[in-house]
Amino acid sequence: MIKLLHTADIHLDSPLRALALRDEGLRARVQIATRIALTRIVDAALSEAVTALLIAGDLFDGAERSAKTAAFLTAQMDRLRTAGIAVFYIKGNHDAENPITGQVDLPGNVHVFDGRGGKVQIEGTQVWVHGVSFSGRHAPESLLPKFAAPVPGAVNIAMLHTSLAGAQGHDTYAPCAVSDLAAMGFDYWALGHIHKRQVHSAAPWIVMPGIPQGRDIGEAGPKSATLIEIGEHRIDTREVPTSSVEFVEHTLDISGLDEDAIRTDLRAAMRDLAGAIASDTGLVRLTLTGHSLRKWQILRDQDMWTETAQAAALETGTLWLEKTRFDLQDDAASSSSGTAVDELDGMITAIRQEPAMQAELATRLEAILAELPAQRRAALTPDEDSAKALAQDLAERGTARVLAAMKGAAE
Amino acid sequence: MRLRQLDLDLFGQFTGKSYDFGTASPGQPDFHVIYGPNEAGKTTTMDGYLRLLYGFPNREPYDFQHQRKNLKISGILEMDGNAQPLTRLPTRGANLLDAHGAPLPEAALQAHLGGLGLDDYRQLLCLDDETIERGGEEIASSKGDIGRLLFSAAAGVSDLTDVLDKLRADADALYKKRASSTELAQLKHALKEVERRIRDEDVSASAYQKLKQDLEAAQQAEQEIRRESAGLRRRHAQAQAQARALPMLAEVTRLDSALDGFADYPQILDINPEALVDMLARQSSAKTEAARLTDALADLEQRLDALDLAPDALELAADLQALSQLHSRHVTADLDLPRRRAALGALQNDMARAARDLGAPDGTDPMSMVVPQAQMGTLDQLLDRRRDAARVFNTEQAEVAQLTTRLAEAKATLAATDGGTAAPSGVADILARFSVDRLAPAYAAAQAAIQGDAARQTEALEALHLRGLTFDSVPPCPLTADEAEDLASRHTQGAEKLDQARAALDALRRESDSLTAQIDLMTGAQGVLTDDAAQKAIAARDALWQAHRVSLSENSADAFAAAMAQVDSQSATRLSQAAELGKLRHLAEQEARIGVEITHAEAALDVLQASQDQLRRPLTAAAAAADLPAELAPHLLAGWVRRRDAAAQAARRLDQTRANHAPVLDKAAQLTRALAPLVALEAPDFEALLAAARNLHSAEQAQAERSAKARAARDGIQADLAARNARLADLEAAVQQAQAQWAAQVADLFDNALDPDVLARSFDPLRNLQALSVQHRDISRQIKGMEADQTTFAARIGLLAATQGLAPASDPLALCSALGDLAKAAEQAQAEHDQLTAARDAAASALAETKATLARIDAQVAQQAQIFPAHVATGTLPDLRAAVATAQDVIAKRAQRRNLAAQICTDLSVDGLEAARQALDGTASADLTAEIAGLEADLDNAEQRLGAAIETRTTAANALAAVTGASDIAELTERRATLEAQIEDTALRYLELDLGHRLAEEAIRRYRDSHRGTMMDATEKAFAELTDGAYTRLMTRPDGKTETLLAQDAAGTTKEAQDMSKGTRFQLYLALRAAAYEQLASQGTCLPFFCDDIFETFDEDRTRAACRLMARIGRTGQAIYLTHHRHVVDIAQQECGDGVTIHHIQSTP
């Protein structure tokens, strides 16, 4: 049986975007998770004694261009060379623009396909690897025409970096349909580009392995590489875990709970999460929801609750709190409407909708956004609508803060 | 909603505490004051009420006396006009019960709470001094911003400005434009730092490529310089070698000529020239020594021949030596003997004297009186025994005499004691039979108790003394004290009311009189025509008109005309008196009204009087029953009845005490009867009798004891005396025996020469004699020894003198001296002979040795000369030395030449001197020096360039080596990403607070606009009332976006809110809260309003005003005020009269 390991989108040395990393203890624990992921992939290749490692693009991140990244990569590839494991590598949209790609001296066991495409027989086997690299940052056209026909009587594996049919609002890269791929006659499509793992088809295999290490809450959950086992008559695949850190979204409903019960539930939830994660470390984004009699007290004491949640997370030894959100409603039974604070609440809700106030909110948002690094600003408010929504959301939360402070002031 | 009743069934320190707030009376304020001292539970009461409304919290602080599960609060709430009994239990779920214990849905209660939660209720409807204090501060800190003030009061957020400022401060801590200490600024600073480090420390992929090229170039350059440098160095070494070789070659040539002709000299030399010098020195000294020794030998032989020896006198010295000890003893004895002989004579005299002292007869040999030491001991013992026996006997004799005297005394005492004894009286038996020790204290206690109670009863009866009446026993009374007091108190209240009613009636009557007088004045003196008078005139006119119509006579006409004229005149007058008329009418109306009021007042007075009489009746009856005057004032009677009850109680207690102690008293009486015959007392009381009996008893006991004691003393002495007499006889016998033994021993020892009694006086002469005899013996022995030694010495010397042929002489000492001289001369001659013989032998042996040495030196010279060729002179030692020196020089020069040749060949790298000469052929020393200097400059230059090249290469290599797979840059990049995320998070958190704050400000402004009218009016009214009219109006003044509150006082001057005194600000806040309460009530939420001692800082006038305000709230809803100040209660009652209900909390134990 021949084994191959398939990965893509390593984005080596691309940083995690996690608030939790401000904690020094956590930094010491999960520094440079993408390196750990690559190391684990190489470890897996060695321990599984694979014949070759397939890297389907975006080995580097567009933004990272340090020679030290290249040095690290070279060292890892050299480990494979020493073990006699071949590496097949196609360049994706990020690799193509990254100068490291051109400058790095990769060891002899690494075969890089160029933009014209090609096929290589894995030494001593009846397995052929086909691949086409991106020649520039963009690949608006399908790259399928560049693939040669499968070699008859052999196992044919094709490597392609593609956004497939693409998603709304995102650029398309080497667009093609799954059905097009299936029709090409290859045994296994080793894809890359989309960070969420998906097996599109098992006959032939069309596999998007997903990013081996999630970098923000948008890439939550455990991550893996895909191990391909080529037997006499069939090909099997399975996942090999690679992420050392995973992002976790968790929502806790606190309806009807008093403070002690919330604390108890928080601890239990953290324990459960800690037991459930597949990686060494979990970064939790917690949202408290529900209808609560204690809504205002909790909103008033949100710093304290954040601390409590953080402590509960730390107790597990594997979890860190990334962020806490409070999305609470008044208890249906006790929602008051008679007090002056409630009246003020009503007024503020009305004022928020007034065009003049909306303009003022927008101005204040713009002023503070000017303090942010440009790319964060762009990511936060890509367009006017999102800026407006953000301002409204913040205004709403701010109102809740003020009202909570007023309601809590007499205590 | 209204609280009618609150029952703290089990809550905090309360068990079964109940407050009845009654029903509200229309037209009266619903105002309650709950009064209790500190810690009595005012706050507990309020919290209890809130628990009735909202249930028990999970963590209940009031579970200290009753466990949480047992807590219970109930009450009656009026909701929409219905009274709803409710009970609240601490159970989970369905803990609100109705009167029948059936669960009620919370909504049933919530519907009436206007949507207020527990915290809302506390904030809005429970006011305490802290809230007022903060509210007052809020007025100052909000700078009178009317929007904030109205909202602050309406929302019950008494420190609104603090809340808003805190939010602003929190926001500012996150971000502030151009500030460097905000969280955001610090994060950005950190970001900048991380970016700088990335820039400084990172090597980009393209820079890395360049580094590799740099290293290759540097390596190549370095190799180049190294090669060049090596060439120069080689040539430099060559030139230096040539320069060195040139002078060496010249030296070789010189040496070659110097060695010419010495070719057959030895190649090596194993002779040490120093050894030759040494050998020369030894040869010359040996020759000198041989000559000296020959002369010395001849001299010694001569001196030996001259010596004279005497061998037989040699032994004499030893013989004399053997006699030396005898010789010295002889000399000593000559000196000592006469002295010793004199001493012996003296001793003999002393002994004769000692014998006389002992009483020996004259002529007795003193030596025969000397007693051996053993016999001395026996004598000593016998004498001691004799003395001891005599002493013991004497002592015992004295004792017997003493005892005899004491016996006589004892007998006399016994006779005296037994003389006055009477027969025992039997009192002891009686005392024992009645256990007097227990009975006496019981009797005393009984007496004390009875007397105490009797005194109290007398006191109580004396207290009943009233108006000359005294009471020996407790008089009857149909009323209890409580009843009498109740009646009296009601009677007093009635009397007050009666007085008030009479005063009111008097006032009314006075007013009525005053009105009548005014009317009379107006109608009389002032001539105001009353309506009656006018009517009368008109009626007269009309009558005359009718009469005139009937008669139509002139008279009638005149009469009518006159009447007509009067009416007209009256009309004119009344017209001019219109104002007075109006007043008159008003006065008349008032008079009529007051008349009615008087009638009512009189009726009320009658009713009050009747009720008083009714109250009076049982009191009068009670007075009659006790024979007290019937007109006694009720309160006096009530006091008397209370004292009477006390007297009755005292009487009862006395009877009870007597009954309790009866058995003790009976027993005491019996005892008295039994003792009376024994004691000579006239009508004794119990204590006196008992004391006398006890005295008698103890006197009898003492007599019996004394008698027994005297008898025992006499018997003891008698027995003792008998024993002593027997012993005395034994002792006398022992004395006589000891005396006999002593006399026998003395007679035996001294052969009856001495009197035993004389000897018994002292042993000293005997002992002296013994000591003298010892000395006598010693000195006799010494004298004999000395005489023997002298005889022996003379004999031995005589013999020796004979052997030496000397004539005998009388003085042995002189003979001995002559013999000694002979022996000494013989010894001296023998010693000199021995010395000279030894010196002669030594000189002969040394001479032989010196001659041998000279022979050996000659042999060595001959042997060493063999290595030289024959033509070299080596016969003598100096010759040999010269030959050796020349050979040494030759060998050294040969070696030098060999070394030079080798050095030259090595330096020039050639095989032999020939080759070297060819190599150096034509080279000059000066040329070489110039070339070397040139080469050195070149080398220095190359060295420098190499250093630079190495540095360049090393730098390049280091730079390249620095590019490792290390993760430092990746870590910094990640740090940068984290910082960016933090910046974003901080910015958004800031914005959240900023926008919230901004919106709240705006909304508060609008709140002001929408509530200014109604709330300001209500506040103004309340504030005017609270300040007792000091401030009559509230107004606002625009101040930018805000509006400031101004208060106008009665004089029309305005004052800004923050400029008011602290107390006035408290009042303003209270007014705002009152207005807020009205606003809430007007919106349909009318709930009980609680105040917890908020008037702490108010003076009396302000407290008064505040009470009025509470009453005012009580007119809208229900006002409950909790206080621990008595004066607040008083003021509330003064201000509100029946409009306030006071509830008391008893301080819990």
Image: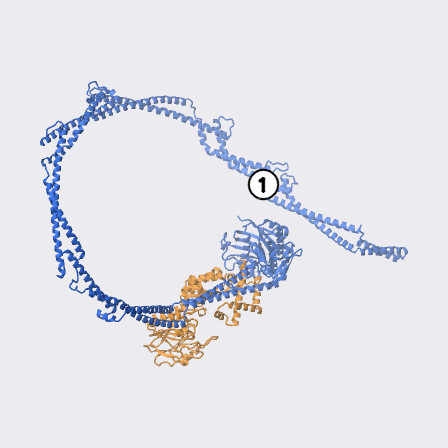
The residue tagged 1 is B645
- Front in this rendered view, residue B101 or A37: A37
Q: Colour of chain A?
A: orange
Label 1 residue SS: helix
Residue at the limit of the structure toward the top, as seen here: B362
Q: Horizontal and vertical percent for residue A25?
A: 42, 62
For the N terminus of chain B, the image quarter is bottom right
Name the residue located 66 percent from the left edge and 46 percent from the top edge: B496
Three-letter code, disc 1: Asp
Display coloring? by chain
- Front in this rendered view, residue A169 or B960: B960
Q: Colour of chain B?
A: blue
Q: Horizontal and vertical percent for residue B939?
A: 33, 69
Q: Is residue B415 left or right of residue B641?
A: left
Residue B1097 in view in this figure: yes
Q: Considering only vertical position in the picture, is B18 above or below B423?
A: below
Q: Horizontal and vertical percent for residue B940?
A: 34, 68
Q: Considering only vertical position in the picture, is B331 above or below B268?
A: above
- Front in this rendered view, residue B423 or B1066: B1066
Q: Horizontal and vertical percent for residue B678?
A: 47, 27
- Front in this rendered view, residue B813 or B818: B818
Q: Return the chain for callout 1.
A: B
Residue A265 in view in this figure: no
